[in-house]
Image (spheres, rainbow, N blue to C red):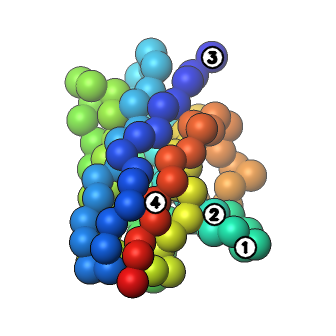
Amino acid sequence: EVQLQASGGGLVQNGGSLRLSCAASEFTFDNYAIGWFRQAPGKEREGVSCIRGSDASTYYADFVKGRFTISSDNAKRTVYLQMNSLKSEDTAVYYCALSRSGGCTAIDLLYDYWGQGTQVTVSS
């Protein structure tokens, strides 16, 4: 079974940066997609970004476009989410997830495996 380990969260000031990592256990990344989701207190989980292993195409939610960048290191089986210009509304638990279908989507139900989440807190 695929296991995902998210890390890199922390406390940062408004306007600061963080880089999240999602390390995956053995699998062939070419066939999958990795997405980042987040959930703030009292809110539903929402899709943030995604990258397809087959062609490295990416997806970003409108509220992070121009600020967040997703990338992958296939040799390390790790996907990164570089988050710049962080705002207080970015405060949430961030999760990475894997879709065996290989397609990027913001629909969390279409992802098969989930990491444990990492807390991101942006102070104003």
Q: Quadrant of residue 60?
A: bottom left
- x%, y% of residue 112? 67, 37
Q: Residues within 10 Å of mark 1 (few under 14, many from 20)?
A: few
> The C terminus is located in which quarter?
bottom left
In this rendering, which labeled residue sits more in front, label 4 or label 3? Answer: 4
Give the CA separation, mark 1 to mark 2: 6 Å
Give the label on residue 1, or none: 3
Q: Is residue 52 visible?
A: yes
Q: Nearer the viewer, residue 69 or 99?
A: 69
29 horizontally vs 97: left or right: left
56 horizontally vs 112: left or right: left
Q: Earlier in the sequence, mark 3 or mark 2?
A: 3
- x%, y% of residue 32? 48, 37
> The N terminus is located in which quarter?
top right
Q: Secondary structure at mark 2?
A: strand
Give the CA separation, mark 4 to mark 3: 27 Å
Q: Earlier in the sequence, mark 4 or mark 1?
A: 1
Instruction: Check disc 1 and report the residue beneath it.
Output: 43
Q: Secondary structure at mark 3?
A: loop
Amino acid type of the residue tagged 4 in the rendering: Val
Give the label on residue 39, or none: 2
The structure residue drawn at horizontal position 40% and vertical position 51%, both measured from the top left corner, is 9
